Structure formats: structure tokens, C-alpha cells
Image (cartoon, rainbow, N blue to C red):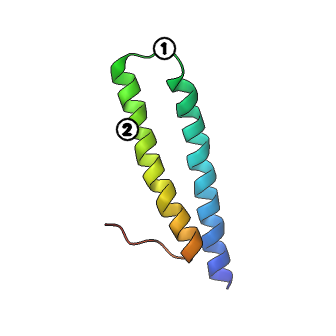
Amino acid sequence: MDAEAESTGGGALELERITARLEQLATELEGDLDDERAAALVREASELASQAGRAVDSAVHGSPAPEG
């Protein structure tokens, strides 16, 4: 059970990091941006959302989710 608790804790920490970055991106996207910068931020947010999904899966199942 200890390994599972550590894995879940790691997933929670990863989710906190991702959430904090998504909040920063949202704040920046609310500003006056050129199209290129906005597109870059949206791409990063999409990648982070994918990472968040994997972190949730890892936290729920206690092991890394297979990619693909």
C-alpha cells in the first residue's frame, strides 16, 4: 500500500503543477495577445490537459497509464 500512496501523492503533486500552469495560461490568454502567441498558449494548454488526464489515471490506478 505504501507504493500506491506514494504514486497517488506524486499524481496529486503533478496535478497541482499542471493546474497552476493552466491558471497562468488562462490569465495570459485574457490579455491582449497576437494570434501567434495565443496559438502557442492554447497548444501548451492542450498538452497540459493531456498530461492531467494521464496524472489522474495514474493517481486512480496507482500506476502509470499506458500511452496510446
CA distance separating discs 2 and 1: 17 Å
The amino acid on which the numbered mark 2 sits, given as a three-letter code, is Arg
20 w.r.t. 39: above or below: below
- Residue on which disc 2 sits: 43
Of 17 and 34, which appears nearest the observer? Answer: 34
Question: Taking 61 as reference, is 2 left or right?
Answer: right
Mark 1 Cα within 10 Å, few/some/many (few <14, many 20+)? Answer: few
Q: Secondary structure at mark 2?
A: helix
Q: Quadrant of residue 10?
A: bottom right
Question: Taking 61 as reference, is 45 left or right?
Answer: left
First in sequence, mark 2 or 1: give its number. 1
The amino acid on which the numbered mark 1 sits, given as a three-letter code, is Asp
Q: Position of residue 26 (x, y in %)?
A: 55, 31
Question: Taking 14 as reference, is 42 left or right?
Answer: left
Q: Position of residue 43 (x, y in %)?
A: 37, 38
65 w.r.t. 12: above or below: below
Q: Position of residue 12 (x, y in %)?
A: 64, 61
Q: Residue at x 59, y 55 (%)?
A: 15
Q: Quadrant of the N terminus?
A: bottom right
- Residue on which disc 1 sits: 32
